[in-house]
Image (cartoon, rainbow, N blue to C red):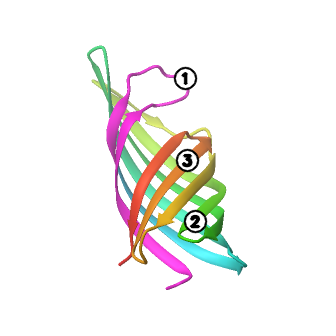
Amino acid sequence: NPRFALGGGVGLMFDGEIGNGHRIGNGEGFRLFGDAQFEAHRFNQNKVIITGTLSHDRFSFSETGIDIDFTVTEIKAGGLILHDVRDFSLYGGLEVVVYSNGDYDIGNFSGDVKRDDRLNLRLGAAFNATKSLALRADLLLIGEQTILLAADFAI
């Protein structure tokens, strides 16, 4: 559908951090996700996009012989303004973490975790190489600091 997109995928994480001032070593892991985008309004070369994402992350951290396993499931909702310039799309917007629930295991200890910072600023650009392939880079700021490099394939 030209106004609605549904997607999913797998992501790899390198050099991850737990956050909140914890000085635990860098983590590695993966993300499973599904997302949806709906074009709510179009004007000139601009679009207003409503977004939703369901993600599940599993990370492992290691610090001086201590192994930490960390999992979190989140639901995010947001909005973007997208501007098309020839083969490129530039976008920016806000997303809110509606649901965040996870846990961690450190040896015999375990506990629950929830995200404190629930607002993200998303900035990004996509190079539309073909009608079915886009190369994308996103930068998330404020609540989380993430650099995302992706390839989007249309089916």
Q: Which residue is mark 1?
A: 21
Kindly identify the amino acid type of the residue bearing the numbered disc 2: Ser
Q: Nearer the viewer, mark 2 or mark 3?
A: 2
Magenta residues, start to end: 1-30
Residue reaching furthest to the bottom: 1
Q: CA distance from mark 2 to mark 1?
A: 35 Å
Given residues 7 and 101, the one toward you in this image is 7
Label tally: 3
Question: Farthest residue toward the top?
Answer: 64
Image location of residue 137, percent across then percent down: 49, 53
Instruction: Let me know if residue 33 is in the magenta part.
Output: no
Q: CA distance from mark 2 to mark 3?
A: 14 Å
Between 151 and 53, the one nearer to me in the picture: 151
Where does the C terminus fall, quadrant-wise? bottom left
Q: CA distance from mark 3 to mark 1?
A: 21 Å
Is label 2 in a helix, a strand or a loop?
A: strand
Query: Residues at badges 2 and 3 in contact (C-beta under 8 Å)?
Result: no
Residue 89 located left or right of residue 131 = right
Residue 81 vs 102, above or below: the answer is: below
Q: Secondary structure at mark 1?
A: loop
Q: Nearer the viewer, mark 3 or mark 1?
A: 3
Q: Is residue 97 visible?
A: no
Q: Which residue matches tag 2?
A: 89
Per the image, the residue denoted by label 3 is: 139
Quarter of image, res 89: bottom right
Residue 78 against residue 30 in the figure, above or below: below
Q: Position of residue 110 (x, y in %)?
A: 36, 30
Q: Amino acid at mark 3?
A: Leu
x and y, in percent, of residue 134 in the image: 44, 66
**Which residue is painted at 43% across and 69% down in the image?**
129
